[in-house]
Amino acid sequence: TSMEANTTPSPLGRAGVGFAIIKHTNVCGVAQRNSVSEAWTAALAGDPESAFGGVLVSNGAIDKATADAINEIFFEVLLAPSFDADALEVLKSKKNRILLELKEAALPGKQYKSILNGTLVQDKDRGNTEKWEEAGGRPSTEAERGDLEFANLVCKHLKSNAIALVKDRQLIGKGCGQTSRIDALRQSLEKARQFGFDLQGAVLASDAFFPFNDCVQLGHQAGITAFIQPGGSIRDKDSIAYCQEQGLALVMTGQRHFRH
């Protein structure tokens, strides 16, 4: 369910105040800001059309200003650590909404998937930034690195084939559930342009390796300056060579997401 996809683990991560909007288990808007109301505004701006009827989640307390803003759209569920009393009055003004308080809890280390007459048990996709390697024409800047980490986390919560475009800790474009990686990128670029985002200086995360160098080429042409991907393709060297020739940052994580 969208609620389950949005809580274990959260696409918000643990750093900063964030807001995420989920539709059919895919993240359609997410941002981190200095306040919960700013995070909501930025998350909604990422794709205001898809937010309709979504599941909302924040890792910050919901105050009245944020509740007033959220109350302007139709949503099904809102999850947050706490709600101010006046915020609850606003949010309860419309029927059939589900408001849930998130509590601190240890996340399970295993994931279970039903397969025909059996069950697949596997480790949770948690990742380890210590194993990341810079392989591009230059190291990622501090700002790019922060956005790359954020984009990689968001991309984990999109169905494969998936691409996430991030700028200033805001999801500005995403492509998901596509049958080719380049189509996922085209979709993400179209979404970003549809809502007026400037792609210059944005970063790109891919949930699995680039099978060809077409993604880094198209991304570069659109203004993207840094990429993050697991690596593992027999043609990794082509994407690496392009990034090195063009002076682009490329981080290899060594771990794919590939959510189905």
Image (tube, helix red, strand yellow):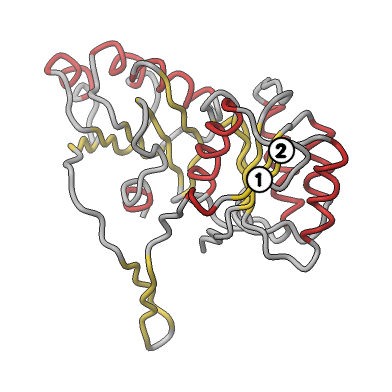
The quadrant in which residue 67 appears is: top left
**Which of 131 and 208 lies nearest the eye of the viewer?**
131
Q: Is residue 49 above or below residue 179?
A: above
Outermost residue toward the bottom in this view = 117
User: Where residue 90 sits in the image (x, y, percent)?
Assistant: 21, 17
User: Where residue 209 sits in the image (x, y, percent)?
Assistant: 68, 59
In this rendering, position of residue 149 left or right of residue 19: right
Outermost residue toward the left in this view = 85
Q: For the N terminus, give its image quadrant.
A: bottom left
Kindly identify the residue that appears in the image at 52 percent across and 31 percent down.
146
Q: Is residue 125 above or below residue 83?
A: below
Q: Amino acid at mark 2?
A: Ala
Kindly identify the residue that appears in the image at 32 percent across and 48 percent down.
3
The 10 Å Cα crowd at callout 2, few under 14, some 14 to 19, many 20 or more, is many
Kindly identify the residue that appears in the image at 26 percent across and 61 percent down.
108
Sequence-first tag of 2 and 1: 1
Outermost residue toward the right in this view = 245
Which mark is on residue 249? 2
The 10 Å Cα crowd at callout 1, few under 14, some 14 to 19, many 20 or more, is some
Which mark is on residue 183? none
User: Where residue 220 sits in the image (x, y, percent)?
Assistant: 81, 36
Do the numbered discs 2 and 1 sit on residues whose CB atoms are within 8 Å? Answer: yes
User: Where residue 161 sits in the image (x, y, percent)?
Assistant: 63, 57
Q: Which residue is mark 1?
A: 134
Kindly identify the residue that appears in the image at 19 percent across and 25 percent down.
92
> What's the CA distance linking mark 2 and mark 1?
7 Å
In this rendering, position of residue 58 left or right of residue 186: left
Give SS at disc 2.
strand
For the residues carrying marks 2 and 1, which lies nearer the camera in this image?
1
Give SS at disc 1.
strand
Q: Amino acid at mark 1?
A: Glu
The quadrant in which residue 127 appears is: bottom left
